[in-house]
Amino acid sequence: MDPQLLSYYEAIERASADMLTAARAGRWDEVVKLEGACVLLISQLKHAAQEPDAPAASAATPKTAQQQQAARIKSRIMQRILVNDAEIRHLAEPWLQELDATLAGRHQTLH
């Protein structure tokens, strides 16, 4: 895996960890801001992965030890991102319910 691509995964993981820290502290505005940063990083990763200079993974070509190590690192990063995301979603549930209730109350008072 291209080191530049791996650096994008690492940056997404850092943003994900920062989102989790903010969610645990109840700083939801910061969570939303960091989520925007993640979306941008993911977009940049997709673009970088599609560039002609990006090495193409071929199933027919055996992976080198370095490529295998990079694949393991990427897998661990992705697992941590998914764990962070799951916890953020769990922490957000009460906040989202409260927001829904607030918005429903406003909607009722408008009529």
Image (cartoon, helix red, strand yellow):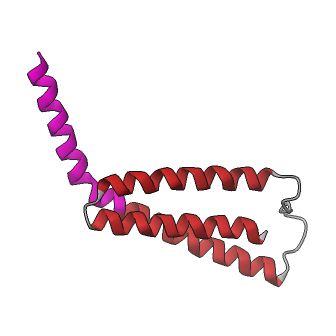
Instruction: Identify the residue at the far bottom of this view.
Output: 65
**Prevailing SS of the magenta stretch:** helix
Residue 4 is situated, as x and y percent measured from the top left of the image, at 74, 67
- Asked if residue 61 lies left or right of residue 25, the reply is right
How many callouts does the rendering have? Answer: 0
Instruction: Identify the residue at the far left of this view.
Output: 109
What's the residue at 25%, 61% (across, down)? 26
Q: Which residues are magenta?
A: 88-111
Asked which quadrant contains residue 56, the reply is bottom right
Residue 72 is situated, as x and y percent measured from the top left of the image, at 67, 77
Q: Nearer the viewer, residue 29 or 46?
A: 29
What's the residue at 57%, 72% (across, down)? 77
What's the residue at 69%, 69% (across, down)? 6
| Residue 33 covered by magenta stretch | no
Q: Can residue 64 be seen from the camera position used here?
A: yes
The N terminus: image quadrant:
bottom right
Q: Can residue 83 be seen from the camera position used here?
A: no
Residue 105 is situated, as x and y percent measured from the top left of the image, at 11, 31
Q: Nearer the viewer, residue 97 or 18?
A: 18
Residue 29 is situated, as x and y percent measured from the top left of the image, at 33, 52
Asked which quadrant contains residue 17, the reply is bottom left
| Residue 109 covered by magenta stretch | yes
Asked which quadrant contains residue 106, the reply is top left
